[in-house]
Image (spheres, rainbow, N blue to C red):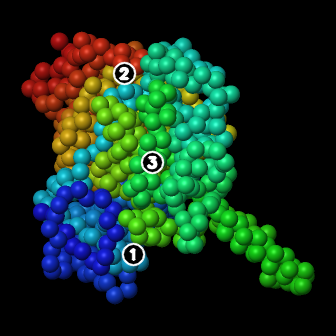
Amino acid sequence: MVKKYIFGKPFETDAVTAQIQPERSAPQIENARIETDKGFRFYYEMNDTDVIYGLGEANRGIDKRGYIYVSRCSDDPDHSEDKTSFYGAHNFIIISGVKNIGLFFDYPSDITFDIGYTGMNRIDISCGRADLYLYVIDGDSAYDVARQFRKIIGKSYIPPKYAFGFGQSRWGYKNADDIENVVKGYRGNKIPIDMVYLDIDYMDGYKDFTVDDRRFPDFPEFVKKMRSKNIRLIPIIDAGVKIEKDYDVYEEGVKYGYFCKREDGTDFTAAVWPGWTHFPDMLNADARKWFGRKYKRLIDQGIEGFWNDMNEPAIFYSKEGIDSLNEAIIEYADNLKSNEGDEETEGLPGKIKEAFENLQNSPDDYRRFYHNVNGKMIRHDMVHNLYGFNMTRAAAEAFEEIVPDKRILLFSRSSYIGMHRYGGVWTGDNKSWWSHILLNLKMMPSLNMCGFLYAGADLGGFGCNATRDLVLRWLAFGVFTPLMRNHAALGTRNQECYQFENVEDFCHIIKVRYRLIPYLYSEFVKAAENDDLYFKPLGFVYPDDRYAVLTQDQLMLGNEIMVAPVYTQNAEGRYVYLPEEMMFAKFLPDGSISRQIMEKGHHYVDIALNEVGLFIKKGKCIPLVDAALSVEEIDMSTLTMLGYDGAGYVFGED
Ligand code: MIG
């Protein structure tokens, strides 16, 4: 059962779509206490064995216990273990143990989840203002709670089928030749691929919805040519609009008052990739409509998918920020002159450096601009976590109008619950670190609980230099994530599959993905249609099995399979826990599949760098097709079954 409580005057985030009659009395939750005198505070006393699920795209484990998390959409490319905020704000948790309770704090600004960090058994959730909706869900199990929550937030976005193909991206592809080379690298080596992503360099001066015609002399023709090779080009769209005379998006935004404004009514100005920009007021319905319609310009040139970036929104610095930095420098310099050698001035270069670094994504800037929400001016910091959500909503609502009968691929960096109805997410600037394969795995089921089904990480890692083995292992997990995209940062080592020795190993791993696409896509669509999860923690399926509940490095996928990727360097396999008897199926490099029935319990399984393993539950089977070079070329007549009936019959072994 879901109960809704109102505190103060909440902002309407549109996270929840169900009409729920609010309760008249305060919530009565055993072991919980709520305070509303200084901001909002929710305390809960956990049992020693309670497991806490949720928080979507957050750090640490599938079990969130033992750390502190802050929902504050942040452009931070260092996803180290100490970090408390990433790009998304997904304020839903499930307390699971003797009782199973779901809590959704519908609050669009900073909110802190201290989950057994300060006090070992204490949950302490706090935010600055006691203006929010609190949804309390009572369920039979964690899984049941998650599904009840999914029901009230509306159906998840479904991408086109080609978006289940493999995609290659890199920040630094500059022009048509660079893109052609990527396509040659894949098609030439017979590695399946469906998408090549266009990062910011395709634009003319980083201006949204423009294409640099020196880099792409005939863009529509180029898009068509790629499409004839079954390759879709997926351009990036940034949140900030370049200030440039005669650039129509800028001119119109100013004219209609569609940009975020300072307190004095002037358009707020900050620097991002294009230099000085204005931010479209994504919380203003008219501005949203206007911005969304701009995507048509690229759709008219044959584009069928987009990724929305920098929409926390990320800010390098503002005019005001630069002014205050200037003042600080002058003040320090004056000090330096008057007290030479003085202790106070010793840290000067460090202080200036710090002041300079603090310019980026500064909380001060988030207090410097306003949104026009139904005629009311709302300061940005009060609704910060809704910006990326509404940028993506702007696009998706426009697609309904521009191409009503077509699915468009769309995913975003920043998000809030509710955005899952409009698009997917990628998890931003991770690194080529082994630990980030595991972080990728842990985020997936948590994102699913919050509605985000179409999701994935930058495979191979965005920052730092990737190694061959890391890319192979990460891809072998990426075989199962709805978004399967290799992406890397400018200046890092090339990590396209064809850049490494023994390309056939990469080719094999990606082919396994294509063999599984009919299964994966149908499990995905089923999950979306039924408000279900595509990836589940083992504890959702085996709540009474303590080993299963505590497993943090394996996932259930759909109703048939379990995945357990290798995520340590130089390992030739891994330990895996089977909560029941299963068949271990391994896709071998020669195209054959080995099958082994394994008992419930702990096992060590060998999985080489060029192999993909999965586990099929007893009495289940999954469809497989022959590999193809693109989703369109998949031949459904090659469909066979993989699995076993548990009574001696093994599909494919006759
Ligand atoms: O400030 O467009 O997360 O995927 O390659 C960096 C360049 C801006 C951040 C995105 C990343 C993308 C990069 N962008």
On residue 290, the disc is: 3
Q: What residue is at 48 percent from the left and 41 percent from the top? A: 294
Q: What residue is at 25 percent from the left and 81 percent from the top? A: 33
Q: What residue is at 35 percent from the left and 45 percent from the top? A: 397
N-term-proximal mark, 1 vs 2: 1
On residue 286, the disc is: none
Between residue 115 and residue 47, name the one nearer to us. 115
Whether residue 492 sits left or right of residue 97 in the image: it is: right
Compared to residue 570, the image places residue 64 above or below, namely below
Secondary structure under tag 1 reads strand
Percent from the top left, x then y, of residue 405? 29, 31
N-term-proximal mark, 2 vs 3: 3
Q: What residue is at 21 percent from the left and 26 percent from the top? A: 622
**Which label sits in the foreground, 2 or 3?**
3
Compared to residue 486, the image places residue 448 above or below, namely below
Percent from the top left, x then y, of residue 375? 40, 67
Residue under pointer 2: 631
Using a 10 Å C-alpha cutoff, classify the residue at mark 2 as few (fewer than 14 neighbours), some (14 to 19) or many (20 or more). Answer: many
**Which label sits in the foreground, 1 or 3?**
3
Q: Is residue 35 visible?
A: yes
| Residue at the bottom extreme of this rendering | 37
Between residue 247 and residue 419, name the one nearer to us. 247
On residue 127, the disc is: 1
For the C terminus, the image quarter is: top left
> What amino acid is found at the position of numbered circle 3 in the picture?
Trp
Q: Is residue 612 visible?
A: no
Percent from the top left, x then y, of residue 1? 12, 63
Percent from the top left, x then y, of residue 441? 39, 45
